[in-house]
């Protein structure tokens, strides 16, 4: 199955930056690119519960023009890339979550139209990163050039979620032909975790022969702040959905949420493929 790279596009600057990054990623992975726009019924909802009352909303001509322009621009930059555009009747977040069932990767911008200025990640991005059925890449920040060089950085805490993140981070580092840095943040009073890092390094090297893997242990009061600072030198930071100490009801742990909101490079949220939440 040739899973596509899917990106949500609404015409906002953030989503157009995400679309460009998604195109580059699709080429890198030899996958088709799907530009998807989830649109709502004029009443503010997706497909109505009783379509005989209001009718299923028709695709928006203005949105279709925006999608076609975006596809044309990307095709000009990457002539060999296969691009499909479509509008889906439904909320943007729910649409992308459903698309993630069949996607290689879902890409979202940091904030689309309708997002409040104080929100670094809009409601759509928050919904997708929490509920997707596969990995989600958040392209941020939009106010600075997106880094093109540097290692792939991944946080390690011994959790099952972190194991998934390490595996997907190793895949990304291999595709990008760069190094992988495994980071554990040791907080005051915590026990030594050298063995934990050694195990993760051995797993990454064993599954990706030839990949340069470097362990790094940081000391800090707040793991999220240490990882955010470390992301300044990275091309990508990879996080799990929930690490050790996370509440069972939280779909995205607090450290992962902080990185998605504040990292200095794109963030990959490493959901396992095909797992519903």
Image (cartoon, rainbow, N blue to C red):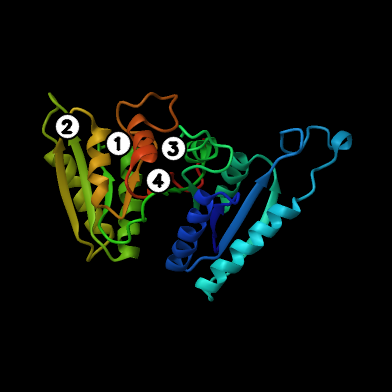
**Mark 1 in CB contact with mark 2 (< 8 angstroms):** no
Indicate the quadrant where residue 86 lies: bottom right
The residue singled out by tag 2 in the image is 220
Residue 209 place in picture, x, y as percent: 24, 64
Indicate the quadrant where residue 258 lies: top left
Camera-near label (2 vs 3) is 3
Instruction: Identify the residue at image location x=25%, y=56%.
Output: 151
Residue 183 place in picture, x, y as percent: 21, 44
Determine the secondary structure under disc 1.
loop
Question: How far apart in space, not on screen, are marks 2 and 3 (Cα)?
Answer: 24 Å
Question: How far apart in space, not on screen, are marks 1 and 2 (Cα)?
Answer: 19 Å
Say whether disc 4 or disc 2 marks the residue closer to the N-terminus: 2
**Mark 1 in CB contact with mark 3 (< 8 angstroms):** no
The residue singled out by tag 4 in the image is 270
> Of the numbered discs in the image, which one, if any, rests on residue 62?
none
- In which quadrant is the N terminus drawn? bottom right
Camera-near label (1 vs 2) is 2
The residue singled out by tag 1 in the image is 159
Camera-near label (1 vs 4) is 4
Residue lying at the far right in this picture: please name it: 52
Camera-side residue of 111 and 57: 111
């Amino acid at each position: 199955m040739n899973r596509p790279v899917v990106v949500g596009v609404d015409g906002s600057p953030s989503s157009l930056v995400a679309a460009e990054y998604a195109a580059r990623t699709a080429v890198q992975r030899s996958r088709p690119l799907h530009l998807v726009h989830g649109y709502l019924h004029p009443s503010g909802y997706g497909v109505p519960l009783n379509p005989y009352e209001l009718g299923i909303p028709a695709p928006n001509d203005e949105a279709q023009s925006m999608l076609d322009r975006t596809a044309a621009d990307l095709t000009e930059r990457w002539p060999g890339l296969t691009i499909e555009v479509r509008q889906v009747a439904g909320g943007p977040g729910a649409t992308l979550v459903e698309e993630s069932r069949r996607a290689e990767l879902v890409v979202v911008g940091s904030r689309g139209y309708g997002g409040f200025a104080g929100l670094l990640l809009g409601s759509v991005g928050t919904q997708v990163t929490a509920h997707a059925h596969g990995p989600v890449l958040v392209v941020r920040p939009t106010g600075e050039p997106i880094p093109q060089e540097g290692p792939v950085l991944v946080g390690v805490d011994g959790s099952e979620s972190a194991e998934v993140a390490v595996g997907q981070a190793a895949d990304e580092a291999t595709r990008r032909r760069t190094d992988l840095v495994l980071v554990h943040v040791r907080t005051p009073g915590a026990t030594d975790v050298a063995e934990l890092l050694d195990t993760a390094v051995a797993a990454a090297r064993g599954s990706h022969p030839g990949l340069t893997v470097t362990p790094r242990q940081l000391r800090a009061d707040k793991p999220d702040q240490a990882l955010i600072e470390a992301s300044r030198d990275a091309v990508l930071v990879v996080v799990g959905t929930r690490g050790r100490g996370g509440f069972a009801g939280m779909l995205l742990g607090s450290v992962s949420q902080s990185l998605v909101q504040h990292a200095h490079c794109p963030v990959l949220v490493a959901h396992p493929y095909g797992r519903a939440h």
